[in-house]
Image (cartoon, coloured by chain):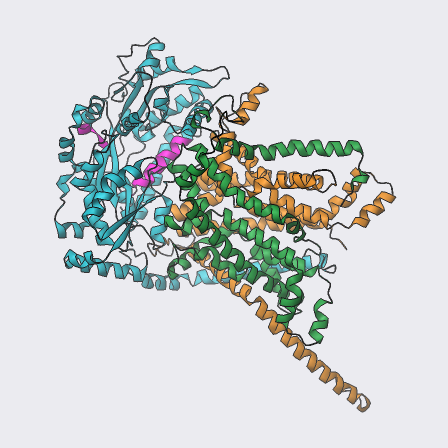
Chain colours: A orange, B green, C cyan
Amino acid sequence: MATVGTTTKDNTAALVQTKRKKATKFETKLALFGLLFASPWILGLLMFNVYPLLASAYYSFTTYSILEPGKFVGFENYTTLFKDDVFWKSISNTLYYTFIFVPLSIVQGVALAMLLNLKIKGQGIYRTLFFIPSLVPEIATVIIWLWLLNPQFGLVNFWLDKIGISGPPWIGSEAWSKPSLILMSLWGTGQAVVIYLAGLQDVPQDYYDAAQVDGANAWQRMRTITLPLLTPVIFFNMIMGMIGALQNFVLPYTLTNGQGTPANSMMFYVMYLYTNGFAYLKMGYASAMAWILFIIVVALTAIIFATQKRWVHYQR
Amino acid sequence: METSSRLTIFQRGFAHAVLIIMGAFFLSPFLWMVSTSLKSNAELFLWPPKWIPSTMVWRNYPDAIDYIPFFKYLSNSLLISGLATIAVLISCPLVAYSLARIPWKGAKPLFGATLIVMMMPYQVTMIPIFITFKNIGWVGTNIPLWLPALFGAPFYIFLLRQFFMGLPKELEDAARIDGASELRIYSQIMLPLCKPALLTIALFQFMGSWKDYQGPLIYLSDESQYTLMLGMQAFKSQHGAEWQLMMATLVMITLPIMILYFLVQKAFIRGITFTGIK
Amino acid sequence: MENVKMQPTNKNKKFVALSLTAITALSLTLAGCGSSNNNNAASTDGNTNTAKADNTAAANNTAKADDTAKADNTAASDEKVTIDFWFPWGGDFQKDFKKTVVDPFEAAHPNIKVKMTFVETTGQTQASDKLLTAIAGGNPPDVALFDRFLIGSWAAKGSLTDIKGMMDADGELKPDDYYPGLWAEVVYKDGVYGLPWGTDNRAMYYNKTLMKQAGLDPEKPPTTLEELDAMAEKIFKKGKNGKYDQIGFIPWMNQGFFYTQAWNWGGKWEDADHNLTPNDPQNVKALQWMADYAKKYDIANLTSFSDAMGQTGMNPIWSGKVGFAFDGNWVLNDLAKYKPNFEWGVAPMPAAEGHPSVTWVGGWSYVIPKGSKHEQAAYEFLKFVAGKEGTLDYAKRANAGNDITAMPAVNDELKLADNPNLKVFLDLMPTAFTRPVTPVGSFLWNETMRVQDLAIHGKGDAQALLDEVKKNVDAELAKVGG
């Protein structure tokens, strides 16, 4: 607010006032436009995110089944869940998958992206080659790998045989089913590679030039320039990859026809959620699972966020 | 971008070697799919496995097309993917422009909300959204598979916002002082500049819808509306043993999207930018 | 932009935390108002005793159904309708069924068209998640081919249409057209929720050629489980890569579910008062026996074999690599396709020492899912398919002749007993068990499958697992209010 100054300053004050009015008018107009342009998303947030989030919280306290209205049961769904063996099994399977797959996919993605960023012959061919698998739909991935990993006439066991190892039954065995799944998932990480590649191309060339002048070799350049500058992208992909891994559904669902065999080793969290919701119509139970998943995601994300100060470097 | 002059012969050789070994891991499953799609029934279960069929059975391809209503499923998939792609191209750039280039109070909190939603698993909202669509009477139609995209998608809004942020700040100021309307600035200055990013999100969304399985699984019940993915899975359980036809179908499902990618790959990578991430 | 860096991240973090607390707080307040909300939900969702898929649609439907039931059929037959029919069987079923049943039906009812859709089964039961989702979504097919023993569970959920009214109104079909045990499976409380179609039971297929090679008398198949164990052991053979080339017997292969084996061991699934008895002492022995097989012959190796078989899409019995297998009479229909180059036979399943050989019957039915838009036309189709004409036409299709239909009169007409292999199954019919008719039938089935899977993978002891099943089904039963 303009304070009332001395008479000499009155004029200027008035001027400032009018200017400010104009400015606020302009600002109001801008704010209106900002709101207008963002309105589809504000609606989308309310309709497809906030409302469903609250609704599923409400359902999670009921025995709603769509066909029957159900009744309010307080925390019963949650207490039943905590006593449900399959629920715990699905959590441990999902975390196992997440904690092994995500780091592996980061290592593989970054390594590949760096190699694909070098100026060598045939780079265009290499790039498309590594992206092909991620263009293969998951349904197809499952069918192909069912063949490759078939214990008796699959290619993988054939190769193992050649070097004198008797291959395991892969998808059919409890110990090997999840590693098989991780292998399949790693095959389809081309999209992450592309994002890393995009990140690498954002690294300014003069950094490298300066390092070159200082006499840094390729390895040192990678450690001191490339990796640090890629950390924001790694950070982003880590969070997105983790959320994706926690939602692992299509591969195990189609591989085991929704059963999670053998011995529930392929029963993943979202699969169990889907089964409860859409195979048993226990919508309340499934909603409780959905909320617990949300809390797990928030917790893990918060942990990753808390560590970012230590290792994520933002370009200035 | 590292240039080759900086690499020794040894380093280059090493890079090639690693790329070729990794490339084999990435390519062989795909090649196996192509090889199986050209086999006769007799050669499917051979031990040792055979890479090159003794006779190429090209007939598997027309047979596969006759085996499932391939073109019906294909057009359903194209329709849904196309609609969803158009929908995000309409909604997301608008929102991203508002978040990145219009100085208004709501931009920051809204972007924060976008980031949170980006981290929210789809399954958390899946059931209430299903129930809502059921009450409207849209379960069993393809509307739920593309309509939400008209209201924006957090990941694409995020990507586009990053891209808008990277553009020089003075672009719209001059136009604003000249009294050009925001709509004009947006459509005549901004949109043309962010073509690569638009292409990126279009490709992401198209591939996402094309490969989506859970959505159609829940919403589509009438077989005449099945997408390729849903039809493929049904085909797998209905004709469990016709592997060569299945593989032929898979090759045909994968090819269109590969061709699409080859055409746009350079621009696709250009459209993703992390300068000024958060 | 270069000035958006570390600081905003902190702000973002704060913002994330803030909005989360806000959301949690909000949801808790909402939950607090839950009870009042709930009354609303109950009153808007219609009355509680009949679950309605969709208020308006359901209301219309009942109104329509009442009308058509009251009015004569001419009103209905004026309009042309297309009914959606979902079936879960792959292979040649669609072709055969269309030719022998759907075409004649459409010829007899020019106003009704039948659209056939394959919808795969998921999970361990023979039902499809998609069917339930479609019913819940208010968009179901008009008719479904449906595993009969699930009717109780699905009717209890309110997901099937009661056809008793339509049946009484037209008076063509009577309960005693079907075998009594089969009819019992389609009845829930006072309603009728489907029509039985086809029945089957289980026996042992044995490979005489492999028996001969192992030095056994091929004309003396095992009659007790002990004999079976001893003979099977002689047939197991490993190849040079350590994997099985030949299998003597895998208890859980094909139709040898834990359900089957429990009866073979003289166990039971319900007592005289219809209490469920999954942890009967003999059931425990059966599960233990299955787990012992898995241990003795190495579950990983057995899985390798069956997975490889699964990939070829051929029933392991016809591969000639399996000594003994328990399977149903429908497997005989495969003979038209595969011409096995070995000698084989069929005999009743062996039972534990001191118990008689038994079997159990399953079978299918046609149901009208809740929320069908064309109940009357759907019922016309049901009546035709599961009535005498449809039943007979389908059983007489080419390349078959091994079906046991649900109608005694039709079976007499088909002269099934003239087929020596089928006769083995037919002779078992009078003493065959059926699975308990209960609203938790499908849950019990899933539970037995779950513990079977755990037991053969060495996860838990048979007694403890089955005690847990008992606890779970009783809890579920209490929920359903059976």
Q: Is residue A179 left or right of residue B186?
A: left
Question: Position of B27 compared to C372: left or right?
Answer: right
Residue C393 in view, yes or no:
yes
Q: Is residue A110 left or right of residue A206?
A: left
Which quadrant of the structure image shows residue C259? top left
Residue A3 is situated, as x and y percent measured from the top left of the image, at: 74, 84
* Depth order, front residue of C352/C335: C335
Residue C306's x, y, as percent?
42, 26
Quadrant of the image occupied by residue C286: top left
**Which residue occupies the foreground of this view, C449 or A84?**
C449
Is B116 in the magenta?
no
Of C38 and C148, the residue lying toward us: C148
Compare residues C130 and B251 and report the one nearer the observer.
B251
Coordinates of residue B6 in the picture (x, y in percent): 81, 39
Q: Main secondary structure of the magenta part?
A: helix
Please tell me whether residue C451 belongs to the stretch shown in magenta.
Answer: yes
Magenta stretch bounds: C429-453
